[in-house]
Image (cartoon, grey):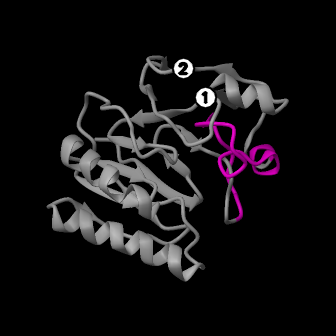
Amino acid sequence: MIIIKVKWLGNSALLVDSEQKIVIDPSFEMEADFEADIVLITHEHDDHINLDDLETVITEETKVYAPQSVYDKFDIKGEVVKAGDLIEEEIKVLDVDCYNSEGSVAYYYKGLYQTADASNYSDPGEEIELLFTACFNDHFSDYLEKVIKLNPKMAVPYHYDPEERQELLQAKGLSSKFEQIGCKSKVIEIGEELEI
């Protein structure tokens, strides 16, 4: 059995370490000391792609995937993806609607579901071991509804600044609500790693 390690890098950025190193949304709040085999970008907002962070983790061999909205805004090389695509025969590209985005997607990989910063995201059609979801106060009911419907083994709030007291309280509040409806949840620190 392959263990997948998932590290939160701040914002909605994740490092997924299994057979390959996969980075989702390269906009970090910590130093990156790794090279990515694959980079997945959910949409064109600056808190989901930082060109300096992207340059830090890519090599000549790194494959970059993103919706067209990212390539329209940034001069980077990569492959355009859309909802319904399958990357490398194992990463599902799913439909989401991120506020004020020209085009956004989410990614599902071997039990991990990274939902960008959307409050409405698709069912991947497979068991969700670990769900990362934003934690904006005005969308709590949407997040709770999705967790009830999708039934992940664990839901983790992200896309907040743990140094900002109000944002940290929102994350803790959402995590507590997940627990109240019977879903295991945890508030993690930037740089903390979980395994699935």
Residue drawn at x 62%, y 36% as measured from the top left: 101
Name the quadrant of the N terminus: top left
Question: Is the residue 89 above or below the residue 181 in the image?
Answer: above
Give coordinates of residue 83: x percent, y percent.
Answer: 48, 21
Give the answer, above or below, for where 67 lies relative to 182.
Answer: above
For mark 1, does the 10 Å Cα neighbourhood hold few (<14), some (14 to 19), or many (20 or more) residues? some
Going by the image, does 94 lie left or right of 149? right
Earlier in the chain: of badge 1 and badge 2, it is 2
Furthest residue toward right: 75
Secondary structure state at the residue bearing disc 2: loop
- Answer left or right for 58 relative to 66: right
Q: Position of residue 130 (x, y in %)?
A: 33, 50
Residue range (magenta): 31-55
Tell me if residue 179 can be seen.
yes
Image location of residue 72, percent across then percent down: 78, 26
Tell me which amino acid carries mark 1. Answer: Gly
On residue 82, which mark appears? 2
Q: Residue 163, located in which quarter of the rendered image? A: bottom right
Residue 131 spot, x, y in % from top left: 35, 49
Q: Which residue is mark 1?
A: 103
